[in-house]
Amino acid sequence: MELSDLPTIYSITEDEIDLNDLLEKITLTSTGAAAIFTGMVRGVTTRGTAHETEFLEYESYIPMAEAKMKQVADEIREKWPVIEGIAIVQRIGKLYPKTPTVLIACTAAHRDTGVFEAARYGIDRLKEIVPVWKKEVGPGHVEWVEGDYIPKPGE
């Protein structure tokens, strides 16, 4: 199968993340494993002093963010050529505790092919280079949360 035929999804959305729909889209008849990471809104944050979070507001410059998500998917394929399907989805908007905010899924023929490592790389790399901003709102506080986005030359 050609690289261009392998299913790859990357998107910024305000819609609920539908895991079943995404898995259907990135699963081939040869797929036997899927590794999935989902980030969630915490109601209690332990960053600094523990505090309550009422909701998070995510923002993004969508064209740039989706281009960077494609770059992450391309990097995954370069490092793990056996990966079959990739989904990278980030929600934006006002999101409440227990709500999935981001999903990275990678599929492969078998679980021992690097599929877990590929999904882990996907979320770590997304946090590094995809421009998504998060505002945390809780009782008596509003804070823009600094992420790990530190672009290097050429990124």
Image: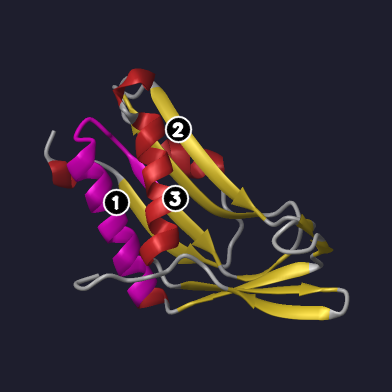
Residue situated in front as seen by the camera: 1 or 92 = 92
Quadrant occupied by the N terminus: top left
Which of the marked residues, 1 or 2, is nearer the chain's N terminus?
Answer: 2
In the rendered image, which residue does mark 3 sit on?
123
Magenta part of the protein: which range?
64-87
Q: Position of residue 149 (x, y in %)?
A: 42, 69
Number of the label disc, if any, that sits on residue 55: none
In the rendered image, which residue does mark 1 sit on?
73
Q: What amino acid is found at the position of numbered circle 3 in the picture?
A: Ile
Q: Position of residue 106 (x, y in %)?
A: 38, 38
Which of the marked residues, 2 or 3, is nearer the chain's N terminus?
Answer: 2
Quadrant occupied by the C terminus: bottom left
**Residue 47 sits in which quadrant?**
bottom right
Residue 59 visible in this rendered orientation of the protein: yes
Element at label 3? helix
Helix, strand or loop: magenta stretch: helix
Q: What amino acid is found at the position of numbered circle 2 in the picture?
A: Ala
Q: What amino acid is found at the position of numbered circle 1 in the picture?
A: Ala
Count of all numbered marks drawn on residues in the image: 3
Mark 3 and mark 2 in contact (Cβ < 8 Å)? Answer: no
Label 2, label 3: how far apart the Cα atoms are: 12 Å
Residue 27 visible in this rendered orientation of the protein: no
Examine the rendered structure and indicate whether residue 29 appears above or below residue 21: above
Q: Position of residue 13 (x, y in %)?
A: 51, 65
Label 3, label 1: how far apart the Cα atoms are: 11 Å
49 displayed left or right of 90: right
Count residues near mark 3 (Cα–Cα under 10 Å), then give few for <14, some for 14-19, many for 20+: some
In the rendered image, which residue does mark 2 sit on?
35
47 displayed left or right of 17: right
